[in-house]
Image: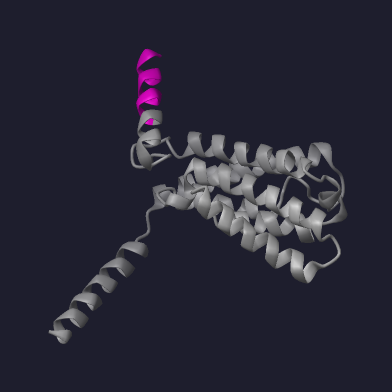
Amino acid sequence: MPVQKIKRGYRKTRYILYKETLVDYKEHFWSFLGSFAGIGILAYIQSMHFSGNDAVYLIGSFGASSVLVYGIIQSPFSQPRNLVGGHLVSAFIGVTVHKLAPDIIWIAAPLAVSLAIILMQITKTLHPPGGATALIAVIGSDKIKDLGYMYVLSPVLIGVLILLFTALIFNNMTSSRTYPSHSTYHKHYHKIRKRLAKKQ
C-alpha cells in the first residue's frame, strides 16, 4: 500500500511539473503587455510629477503585484479584493506603526509586516506584496515617510487602481483569460461586461 501511494504521488508530481513548465506564448504575450502597460503608466506619472531617483509612485510592491495580477491571474491572491484591500490595509498598518515607533526600526519593521499579514487574513484580503507595502512605509525614504497617511491614498491607492484597471483590460482580451476569476462577485462582473459588449 505505501508503495502505491508513493507511485501515485510521483505521477501527480510529474504531471504538475509538466503542466507548470508548458510554454504558452499567448499567455506570455498578454502577461508582458499587461504588466508593461500597468508599470509603464505608473512610471510615466512618476516622471511627470517627480524628478530624481526617489520613486514615490513606483513602490517595489507594485512589481510583485504585477507578477500576480498579470502572470498568475487565476490565483486567489490576484483577485481585485485582495489586490486593493491587501495594499490599503498594509499601507495603513505600515504608516501607523511608523508613527508609533519611528526610530526603532528593529521593532517597527517586523511589527508592520506581521500586523499587516494578520489584518489581511482577518479581512480576507491576503495579498503577498502587501507585506512589502507595509515595510516600505517604515523603511522607505524620507519622501515616503513624510507623506504620512497620504501614503495610503497616493501612491498606494492610485497605483493599485491603475494596476487593477490595466489588468481588467489586458486580462480579458482573449477568451482563454478571464479576470477576475473567483466568487459570485466576479461572475456578476463578467455578466455585466458581456451585456455591455452585446449592446455595442
Q: Quadrant of residue 180?
A: top left
Of residues 104 and 137, the one drawn nearer to the viewer in this rendering:
104
Q: Which residues are magenta?
A: 190-200
Tell me where residue 165 appears, x and y as whole percent: 55, 34
Query: Which residue sits furthest top?
Result: 199
Identify the residue at horizontal 84%, vertical 42% (top origin).
Answer: 50
Tell me where residue 4 appears, x and y as whole percent: 14, 81
Is residue 7 visible in the rendered image? The answer is yes
Identify the residue at horizontal 37%, vertical 29% (top origin).
Answer: 188
> Does residue 169 appear left or right of residue 96 in this picture?
left
Q: Does 193 appear in magenta? A: yes
Identify the residue at horizontal 22%, vertical 74% (top origin).
Answer: 11
Q: Does 62 appear in magenta? A: no
Secondary structure mostly seen in the magenta stretch: helix
Of residues 182 and 31, the one drawn nearer to the viewer in this rendering:
182
Tell me where residue 26 appears, x and y as whole percent: 40, 47
Tell me where residue 2 appears, x and y as whole percent: 17, 85
Quadrant containing the C terminus is top left
Identify the residue at horizontal 52%, vertical 47% (top origin).
Answer: 123
Against 142, residue 6 (above or below) is below
